[in-house]
Image (cartoon, helix red, strand yellow):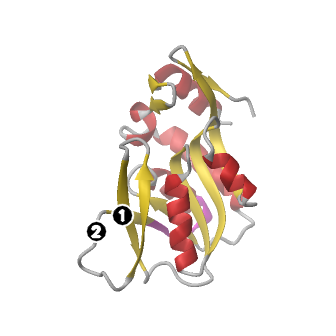
């Protein structure tokens, strides 16, 4: 776990309810570059021997974090766009992802030009709860006949099922911080 990230979560995370926290002040609205760089280093160290070809994320919150890891791994970042693409309908991979935060289904897509068969892909995202975004990205990787090498997450909600489901599939999952639970308006982090 990254000490500075832990401290930021405990000090600045805003508890919305028993299952949701906002970290807009340092992760997904205003960005703390020092912490993002440290997370990029953690992801690099975890996957530097895995011959990654591409980092895949989803717009918009995962992009900055993905860039930090991509700089160290020296690979490109591809981000899935949200919404319907009317320009290249025949040259895309697409899927539907449910957003627990917004409680809506969203179409995401990527160009087939950038995700190719047999590529070794690392997924990076800001939060992991139920795993909807990650499983959506994995679906795009599968459609391209590429390989998901692993998943990197800034903050995992350990009380949700996403992390357990990813690990149960034998996929390497690296989280920089894990929220064990939220109690009486306080975030309780897991020590790992």
Q: Which residue is mark 1?
A: 107
Q: Secondary structure at mark 2?
A: loop
Q: Position of residue 160 (x, y in %)?
A: 60, 39
Question: Percent from the top left, x then y, of residue 8?
Answer: 52, 27
Residue 136 vs 167, above or below: the answer is: below
Magenta-span inclusion, residue 79: no
* Residue 71 visible here: no
Quadrant for the N terminus, please: top right
Q: Residue at x 55, y 60 (%)?
A: 135
Side (left or right) of 127 relative to 146: left
| Residue with the most extreme left position | 86
Label pair 2/1, CB-CB below 8 angstroms: yes
Confirm whether residue 60 shows in the render: yes
x, y percent for residue 60: 38, 53
In magenta, the rendered stretch is 71-78
**Residue 75 falls in image quadrant:** bottom right
Q: Quadrant of residue 191?
A: top right
Residue 71 higher or lower than 9, as above or below: below
Apparent side of residue 75 relative to residue 113 in the rendered image (left or right): right
Residue marked by disc 2? 84
Q: Secondary structure at mark 1?
A: strand
Q: What residue is rendered at 55% in x and 73% in y?
A: 141
- Packing grade of label 1 (10 A; few <14, some 14-19, many >=20) is some
**The magenta stretch spans residue 77:** yes
Mark 2 vs mark 1, CA separation in Å = 6 Å
Going from the N terminus, do you reach mark 2 or mark 1 first?
Answer: 2
In the depicted structure, whether residue 172 falls above or below residue 184? below
- Residue drawn 35% across the image and 43% down it: 102
Q: In the image, residue 5 lies at what x, y percent? A: 57, 33
Left or right, 173 with reference to 153: right
């Amino acid at each position: 776990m990254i000490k500075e990230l832990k401290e930021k979560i405990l000090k600045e995370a805003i508890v919305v309810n028993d299952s949701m926290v906002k970290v807009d002040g340092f992760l997904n609205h205003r960005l703390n570059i020092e912490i993002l760089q440290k997370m990029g280093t953690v992801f690099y160290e975890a996957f530097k021997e895995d011959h990654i070809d591409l980092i895949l994320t989803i717009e918009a919150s995962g992009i900055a974090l993905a860039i930090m890891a991509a700089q160290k791994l020296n690979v490109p970042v591809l981000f899935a766009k949200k919404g319907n693409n009317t320009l290249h309908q025949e040259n895309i991979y697409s899927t539907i992802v449910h957003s627990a935060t917004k409680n809506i289904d969203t179409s995401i897509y990527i160009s087939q030009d950038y995700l190719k068969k047999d590529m070794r892909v690392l997924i990076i995202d800001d939060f992991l709860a139920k795993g909807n975004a990650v499983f959506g990205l994995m679906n795009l990787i599968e459609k391209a006949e590429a390989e998901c090498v692993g998943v990197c997450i800034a903050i995992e909600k350990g009380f949700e099922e996403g992390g357990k489901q990813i690990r149960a599939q034998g996929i390497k999952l690296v989280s920089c911080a894990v929220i064990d639970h939220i109690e009486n308006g306080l975030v309780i982090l897991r020590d790992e």
